[in-house]
Image (tube, rainbow, N blue to C red):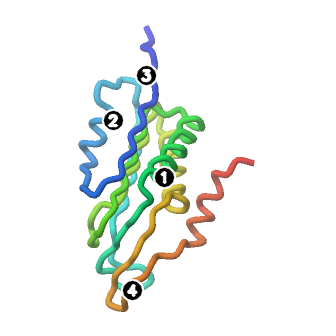
Amino acid sequence: MISPVTACSVTIRIQQDDFDIAREIAMLTKSRTDIGAVVSFSGICRADDDSAKVSALTLEHYPGMAEDEIKRHADEATSRWPLNGVTIIHRVGRFMPGQNIVLVLTASQHRQGAFQAAEFLMDYLKTSAPFWKKEESATGTGWVEAHTRDDEAAARWTKS
């Protein structure tokens, strides 16, 4: 007997507090026997970027708009791939190198959809989500500009 497929659950949180990846995966998969793959991506504040030592990174967002835009892209991911669950957590505030910034979890019956959806969501978060980054280093403080390589990665998901 085949069990009915449970609808795709989508969780989106923007928060200052850190997250626990194992706990988030456990919450996503709890009591779910239809999930055969979970792909996770965690973004971490790094110290080095173009040889300038980053001492801190501050992330700001547009409250309400950020959640709505992330939800819109999560909905697109669930329409493009056979997903059983999505969790997106993006932190805001001031971060030191080594601290968690973002978590994307995608769950599916099979790995291919979960991998592709996670990449799609991260490419969106990196290029278009309403977040702003300010880096602090020994040479000063400045807002982080968009990178062409990120836009090129995101362009592969455009529907023709």
Instruction: Identify the disc placed on residue 28.
Output: 2
* Element carrying mark 3: loop
| Kind of residue at badge 2 | Leu
Q: Nearer the viewer, mark 2 or mark 1?
A: 1
- Contact check, label 2 and label 3, Cβ < 8 Å: no
Q: Nearer the viewer, mark 1 or mark 4?
A: 1
Sort mark 2 into few (<14), some (14-19) or many (20+) by Cα contacts within 10 Å: many
| Kind of residue at badge 1 | Met
Label 3, on which residue?
A: 6
Sort mark 1 into few (<14), some (14-19) or many (20+) by Cα contacts within 10 Å: few
For image coordinates 49% across by 34% down, the residue present is: 83
* Element carrying mark 2: helix
Instruction: Identify the disc placed on residue 52.
Output: 4
Of label 2 and label 3, which has the lower sequence position? 3
C-alpha distance separating marks 3 and 4: 48 Å
| Kind of residue at badge 4 | Ala
Label 1, on which residue?
A: 65
C-alpha distance separating marks 2 and 3: 12 Å
Image coordinates for residue 18, horizontal then vertical, percent:
25, 56
For image coordinates 75% across by 48% down, the residue present is: 160
C-alpha distance separating marks 2 and 1: 24 Å
| Kind of residue at badge 3 | Thr
Image coordinates for residue 33, horizontal then vertical, percent:
36, 23
Sort mark 3 into few (<14), some (14-19) or many (20+) by Cα contacts within 10 Å: few
Left or right position of 50 against 31: right
Of label 1 and label 4, which has the lower sequence position? 4
